[in-house]
Amino acid sequence: MAKIVLGVGTSHGPMLSTPPEQWDLRVTADKGMRHPFRGQTYSFDELAQLRTPERLDQQITLDVWRARHAQCRRAISELARLYDEVKPDIAVIVGNDQMEIFNDDLVPAFSVLWGDQIINSEYTPERMASLPPGVAVSVSGHIPPGGAVHEAVPDLGRHLTEHLIGSEFDITALKRLPGDETPHAFGFVFRQIMSDRVVPTVPVLVNTFYPPNQPTAKRCADFGRALFRAIEAWDSDARVAVFASGGLTHFTIDEELDQLLLSAITDGDVDRITQVQESYFQAGTSEMKNWIPVASAMQAGSLKPTVVDYVPCYRSLAGTGNAMAFVHWLP
């Protein structure tokens, strides 16, 4: 039977692939959005007023940005080192799509690739020009020059789909990823944790962002336990790494919620995070629902967690930015 030999949780936000001197480029977009924060929704100016007591002006200096960017890069390097050391045969990556391959007409709650290839095409000049401020600079963090084609694992993809269906999860079975793009949740892992040395991979997609069919946090925890059983039931001697890609809180950082998730992981009590009201898991913070299945699977398999680092990367007085987290699990 297959064996899980490594678990990894990593943030994948554009700030990780952007020079810290340019972190403020995204603030223009932040100012034009309404931001979910602790169950409510605020304008940028309302958030800045609400969070005045936090003295976030001290968090958005260039010296702090440089230090935190370096801190994140060290954590990514540590996860990449561990991946190289463990040398898994196959990977399963739990991530989400942000309308890179799906669209308003079709957004599955859960989907699994059981095709042969993962195509990660380079963006056209027109696509690059259409990206929001501060995003284009980060694209090389998840798409290599010239693009890439990676090997998938159709046998495992089909096995996971059938097993999860048998566990009463409705899975959309994908023979290919729509279009010729790979969501950045997966491309980031390929480029920055696997360092472009990509083992055959099964992408598992969770609709964290888009109503009305976002799985609940509890459903994601149950999904993770079923995913663990499915992987270990696969008739193969493959050594499998399982990745969670995304999060933590953004586009508005909430360190209290981040620490709740990380403590639930380290305490071996993932169900604790499922008690949080669903209104908290919105916008980028919803990507915690990529971590919950993996943390649940690792707990089911008794793999031991280590928090490599947690780095709240603020970019504005409103507390916008991305809280970055990096965790691994080992038997």
Image (spheres, helix red, strand yellow):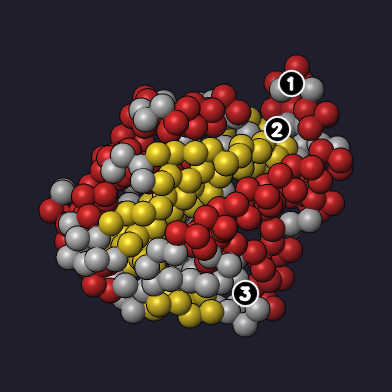
Q: Which residue is mark 1?
A: 54
Q: Position of residue 128 (x, y in %)?
A: 68, 71
Q: Residue at x 47, y 36 (%)?
A: 281
Disc 2 and disc 1 in contact, CB within 8 angstroms: yes
Q: Which residue is mark 2?
A: 319
Q: Which residue is mark 3?
A: 144
As drawn, the residue found furthest toward the left would be 166
- In this rendering, the count of numbered labels is 3
Disc 3 and disc 2 in contact, CB within 8 angstroms: no
What is the quadrant of residue 3 in the picture?
Answer: bottom left
Q: Could you tell me how far apart the alpha carbons at marks 3 and 2 are, in whole angstroms?
A: 31 Å
Mark toward the start of the polypeptide (2 vs 1): 1
Q: Is residue 143 left or right of residue 300?
A: right
Q: Position of residue 313 (x, y in %)?
A: 70, 40
Q: Residue at x 26, y 51 (%)?
A: 227
Residue 322 position (above or below residue 153):
above
Quadrant of the frame with the N terminus: bottom left
Q: Nearer the viewer, mark 3 or mark 1?
A: 3
Q: Position of residue 205 (x, y in %)?
A: 38, 57
Examine the rendering and report whether any part of residue 195 can be seen.
yes
Hey, what amino acid is under mark 1?
A: Glu
